[in-house]
Structure formats: C-alpha cells, structure tokens
C-alpha cells in the first residue's frame, strides 16, 4: 500500500501542476486565442468520455494494474505532446490523449485499490488515498504558481511527463495487486440498481464541482477581496487532505448511504449560506464566506470518503471493472455540467444556488431511499464479507 500511495502522490503532483494550467499554456505558449483553446480542450475532454466502457472490460479481463499503468503511459504521451504542439490540430490530439488517459486512470483506479486492500472494508483505505492525492494535487498547484511567477510555464508539461512515467514505473515494479478473474455472462451489463447509484452520486457531485469552478466567480462578484477565492480553495484542500479518515471514523456507525445523504444536506446548507452572503455587510463577507467554505469542505470530505467504497461494495465481483468504470461517469458528467451551472449567474445571483440545492436535496432523499433497499454488507462497512 505504501508504494501505491507514493505512486499516486507523484501522479497528483504532476496533475496539480499542469491540469489547471492547460488553457493558460494553450494561450500563452501555443499561442491560440482563448476561445479556440477553450473549445479544443472541451472537445478533447468529451472524446475522453468514450473510454470508460472499454476500460471496464479491460479491467475485468486483465486486472486493473496493467490498465492503470497503461493510463499513465497514455497521459505521459499526451503531456509530452504539449511540448511540441504548434496549433489547434496538434493541441487537439494531445488533449485527446491526455483526456483518454485520465478516463482510463479513473475507470481502473478504484478496482486497483480494491485489489490491493483485499477483503477488508474499503472506507478507511480509500479515505487515506483521497487525502494523499488531495495534498499532492495542492502541492502541484503551488509549484504551478511558482512556475508562472518565474516565467517557466514551458517546464510544466515536462514535469507532468516525468510524474506519469515515475508513477507507471513504481506501479509496475513495486505494487502487487492479486486479481482473481471471475467468469461473467457475455453481456455483463451494468445493473439498473448500480445506475441509480451513478445518477444519485452525480446529483451531489454537480454541487461539489460547482464549488471548484463557481466560487471564484461568485466571491469576486460580491466585491470581496481578490485574495479570497484562493484562500477558500486552499482551505478546502487542507480539509480534504487531512480529515478523510476522521470523517470515516465519525460516521462509522452510519450506513454508507446515510453518510452520503448527510454530505448532501451539508451541500444544501452551503447553498443557503452563500445565498445569504448577498445580504451580509461588505466588511463581514470574507469571514462569512470562509465559514461557509468550511461547510462545503465538510460535505466534500464526507462524500469523498464513503462514496467509492459504496460503489465497490455494490459492484458484482465478476463485472466490477465495468461497474466501477460506469461509476466514473457520475463525476465526469458533473464536471462537464458544472460550468453550465456557473453560467446561470447571468440569470441572477440566486439561480445556480437554487439548482445546486435542488440537485443535492434530491440526492439526499434518493440516497436514503436507495440505502433501504440494499443488503447490510453493502451499506455497513463492518459487515462486508470477503468477495
């Protein structure tokens, strides 16, 4: 497990360094207009959505470790392509490679973690992985800020290439993940029950992704200091990188679905607090918004520490790869929808908050109802048997 954590940490330092800088790199180094860069990156990301079904079948056939290693190699090729990209065509190809590698990675990562952890409950180990990845992504973001400040943006994709290659080598040489192939029927379709979980997860994930892309727009629109969005995002990173195992411990008596529903309720509360911020005196708004950020951070750490463990427990052993790959669509689609929710600020400052609160409310009630129909060994970690 230690080598796996090291590999994932290195991967996330590189990702935190370069992924947020993709459009900046495309405009400042490649020389594309902002609109062209945005469209190119978006199209590449959408192409990546074709990967999870293939990834899931590969995981079920050969095991997750080779697939995760392949994802690192594919992402390294994509990142390397940025170095020589000279126009929209070259950039589109490299973005497609990078996006395909990312989807391959996320579609196989939790199957690999499940194999490494073995038959014991996955909640705490998954929380540890999430904490390490969050901390290292934040470190990568700090390195990106430093590279920008010294005018060394061209170095960013090269560092990302190195991080992917080193991660792949560690996984190939040091990580052992026994994988038993279980015979499944030829169809191997994702069950309707599991698709319900994907939908409910996506409803909550939209709000959490909206926080990442929407809070800077909202905060600056309220006339708050320009430093506040960065501090809010840094506060969120600190909470998610330090409190995952604490969240698991505090909610260990809850059913997994109940813990997720509580996370959704915190998200609704955050929406109310942010909407109320419009009535708070200007001098008090920074403190109010920072306090509100703690609420959404609690929501994120509660949700992130339990949701993947629930998905693994619910996925049938014979088609676990396909089910977990399908599960990633909850987060991928949420990431695509979040900017559209941010655009609702054009209708009024209230509009995005109402949409996010409604989605989270439906998610909270839906998860509670969904949990009542699941076996104890799926929703309660202490009763998970060997699978």
Image (cartoon, helix red, strand yellow):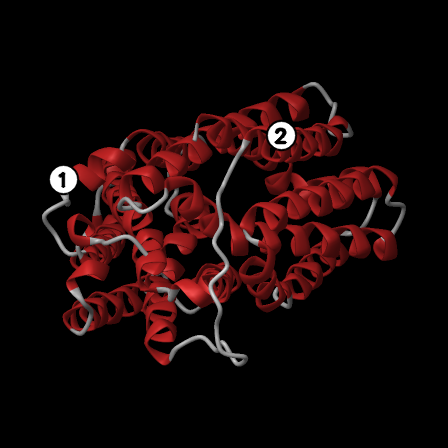
Q: Which residue is mark 1?
A: 250
Q: Along the line of sight, which residue is nearer the eye, 189 or 151?
A: 189
Q: Is residue 45 above or below residue 234?
A: below
Q: Along the line of sight, which residue is nearer the eye, 61 or 217?
A: 61
Q: Position of residue 384 (x, y in %)?
A: 22, 53
- Does 135 sit left or right of 127 as displayed? right
Q: State the separation of the CA atoms marked 2 and 1.
A: 36 Å
Position of the N terminus, as image quadrant, is: top left
- Within 10 Å of the Cα at label 1, are there few (<14), some (14-19), or many (20+) other Cα atoms? few
Q: Which residue is at 62% across, 47% downward?
A: 66
Circle 2 SS class: helix
Q: Position of residue 264 (x, y in %)?
A: 24, 58
Q: Position of residue 361 (x, y in %)?
A: 22, 67
- Does 3 sit left or right of 76 as displayed? left
Mark identifier at residue 294: none
Q: Which residue is mark 2?
A: 173
Task: Tell me which numbered mark, 2 or 1, is placed earlier along the sequence.
Answer: 2
Q: Position of residue 50 (x, y in %)?
A: 64, 68
Q: Which residue is at 32% across, 56% downward?
A: 387
Q: Which residue is at 48% across, 60% downward?
A: 328
Circle 1 SS class: helix
Q: Is residue 344 visible?
A: no
């Amino acid at each position: 497990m230690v080598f796996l954590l090291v590999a994932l940490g290195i991967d996330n330092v590189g990702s935190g360094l370069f992924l947020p800088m993709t459009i900046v790199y495309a405009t400042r180094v490649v020389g594309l207009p902002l609109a062209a860069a945005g469209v190119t990156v978006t199209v590449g990301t959408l192409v990546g959505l074709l990967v999870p079904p293939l990834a899931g079948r590969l995981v079920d056939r050969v095991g997750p470790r080779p697939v995760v290693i392949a994802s690192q190699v594919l992402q390294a090729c994509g990142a390397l392509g940025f170095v020589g990209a000279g126009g929209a065509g070259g950039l589109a190809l490299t973005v497609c490679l990078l996006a395909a590698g990312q989807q391959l990675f996320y579609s196989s990562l939790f199957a690999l973690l499940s194999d490494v952890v073995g038959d014991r409950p996955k909640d705490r180990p998954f929380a540890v992985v999430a904490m390490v990845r969050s901390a290292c992504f934040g470190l990568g973001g700090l390195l990106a800020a430093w590279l920008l400040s010294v005018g060394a943006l061209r170095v960013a994709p090269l560092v990302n290439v190195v991080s992917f290659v080193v991660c792949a080598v560690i996984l190939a040489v040091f990580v052992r993940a026994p994988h038993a192939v279980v015979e499944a029927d030829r169809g191997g379709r994702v069950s309707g029950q599991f698709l319900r979980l994907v939908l409910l997860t996506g409803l909550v994930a939209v709000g959490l992704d909206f926080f990442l892309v929407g809070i800077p727009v909202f905060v600056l629109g309220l006339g708050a200091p320009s430093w506040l969005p960065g501090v809010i995002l840094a506060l969120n990173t600190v909470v998610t990188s330090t409190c995952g195992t604490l969240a698991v411990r505090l909610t260990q008596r809850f059913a997994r679905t109940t813990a997720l529903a509580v996370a959704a309720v915190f998200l609704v509360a955050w929406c109310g607090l942010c909407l109320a911020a419009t009535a708070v005196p200007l001098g008090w708004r920074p403190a109010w918004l920072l306090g509100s950020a703690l609420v959404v951070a609690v929501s994120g750490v509660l949700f992130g520490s339990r949701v993947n463990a629930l998905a693994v427990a619910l996925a049938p052993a014979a088609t676990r790869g396909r089910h977990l790959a399908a599960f990633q669509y909850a987060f991928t689609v949420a990431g695509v929808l979040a900017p559209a929710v941010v655009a609702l600020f054009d209708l009024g400052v209230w509009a995005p908050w109402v949409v996010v609160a409604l989605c989270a409310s439906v998610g909270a009630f839906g998860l509670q109802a969904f949990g009542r129909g699941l076996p104890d060994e799926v929703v309660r970690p202490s009763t998970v048997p060997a699978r």
